[in-house]
Image (spheres, helix red, strand yellow):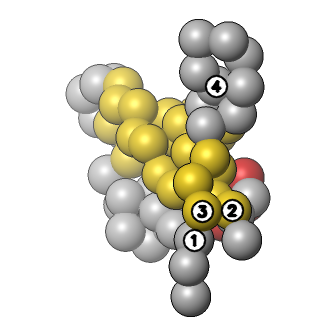
């Protein structure tokens, strides 16, 4: 099984400070959902600005093997 390294963008609701987090996940939705109700969401200080996979300098997805 493989995980992909995702880049998740968040922005502070009051200050506008933008932060990019790197999250290992199986899919885009999982990467974003892992931050729900922790950093992003109605009662949180940050709002989500986007999620996308990370690529290396050759344009390949950055992945890792997950061993159960």
Mark before the other along the chain sequence, 2 or 3: 2
Say whether marks 3 and 1 touch (CB < 8 Å): yes
Query: Above or below — where is 5 with respect to 68?
Result: above
User: Which residue is the site of mark 1?
Assistant: 66
Secondary structure of the residue carrying tag 4 is loop
Q: CA–CA distance between discs 2 and 4?
A: 15 Å
Mark before the other along the chain sequence, 1 or 2: 2
Q: CA–CA distance between discs 1 and 4?
A: 18 Å
Secondary structure of the residue carrying tag 2 is strand
Residue lying at 36% horizontally and 25% vertically, measured from the top left: 18
Residue 65, position as x, y percentages in the image: 60, 62
User: Which residue is the site of mark 2?
Assistant: 2
Q: CA–CA distance between discs 1 and 2?
A: 6 Å
Query: Above or below — where is 55 with respect to 68?
Result: above
Residue 5, position as x, y percentages in the image: 56, 45
Mark before the other along the chain sequence, 2 or 4: 2
Residue lying at 32% horizontally and 52% vertically, measured from the top left: 45
Q: CA–CA distance between discs 2 and 3?
A: 5 Å
User: Which residue is the site of mark 3?
Assistant: 65
Say whether marks 1 and 4 touch (CB < 8 Å): no
Secondary structure of the residue carrying tag 1 is loop
Query: Above or below — where is 18 with respect to 58?
Result: below
Q: Nearer the viewer, mark 4 or mark 3?
A: 3
User: Which residue is the site of mark 4?
Assistant: 55
Residue 51 shown left or right of residue 41 in the figure: right
Residue 33 shown left or right of residue 18 in the figure: right
Give the crowd class for mark 1: few <14, some 14-19, many >=20 residues within 10 Å. Answer: few
Say whether marks 1 and 2 touch (CB < 8 Å): yes
Q: In the figure, residue 2 lies in which quadrant?
A: bottom right
């Amino acid at each position: 099984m493989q995980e992909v390294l995702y880049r998740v963008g968040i922005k502070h609701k009051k200050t506008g400070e933008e932060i990019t987090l790197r999250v290992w996940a199986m899919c885009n939705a999982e990467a974003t959902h892992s931050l729900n109700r922790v950093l992003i969401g109605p009662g949180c200080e940050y709002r989500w600005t986007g999620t996308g996979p990370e690529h290396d300098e050759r344009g390949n997805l950055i992945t890792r093997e997950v061993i159960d």
